[in-house]
Image (cartoon, helix red, strand yellow):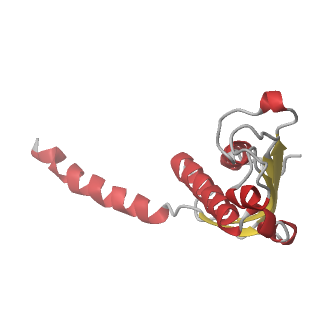
Amino acid sequence: MRRLAFLAPLAAVMAVATAAQAQPAEVSVSIGPALQEKLEDLGAPEVQREADRLAAVVREALARAGALEGARVELVLVDIRPNHPTFEQMAHRPGLDGQRSVSTGGATIEGRVITADGQDRPVRYDWYSTSLAEVWGFGTWDDAERAFDRLAANLVNDRLVTR
């Protein structure tokens, strides 16, 4: 038993060293110029919340999978379309119904990944529902969030450009 007593401290040191080496990817999301022109119609706070959600979804997926460790992921939310009217849209168009007014939604995301070894790799992804039959969920941004999840899965699997 004494012979193996040195293994516990060694295992603890190795765990700390491994944790120090494994740096999660740094993820940032900005709003693209074309989308900034639509902020007044969609509502700037809602779009910013979705940009923040995109960053969180990607960050969590990469951390969970241990993918792109030490990389910098710089994404641009190029376009986003809601499934239901946003609060801003309903305020300007009283005839819209927040639940019964349904549309196809989705998002376009571009950017780049700068890997830990310095490679600069482009990122492109878009997904939009093509018919009302594809729209699922009752949230305003469900299809956009579906696009975020799919982009995150692609990044985990090193598929950076898909169109």
How far across and down, in percent of the image, does residue 22 sit?
A: 49, 60
Q: Is residue 20 above or below residue 60?
A: below
Q: Quadrant of residue 43?
A: bottom right
Task: Please count the marks in the image.
Answer: 0
Question: Going by the image, does 146 lie left or right of 24?
Answer: right
**Residue drawn at the location 53% of the way across and 53% of the way down:** 63
Q: What residue do we see at 64% from left, 43% from top?
A: 139
59 vs 79, left or right, is left
Tell me residue 49's x, y (percent): 62, 62
- Horizontal side of 65 relative to 73 (left or right) equals left
Which of the pair 6/68 is nearer the observer?
68
Q: Residue furthest top?
A: 133
Which quadrant of the figure has residue 75?
A: bottom right
Screen quadrant of the N terminus: top left
Horizontal side of residue 130 vs 102, given as left or right: right
Q: Which residue is more in the foreground, 153 or 143?
A: 143
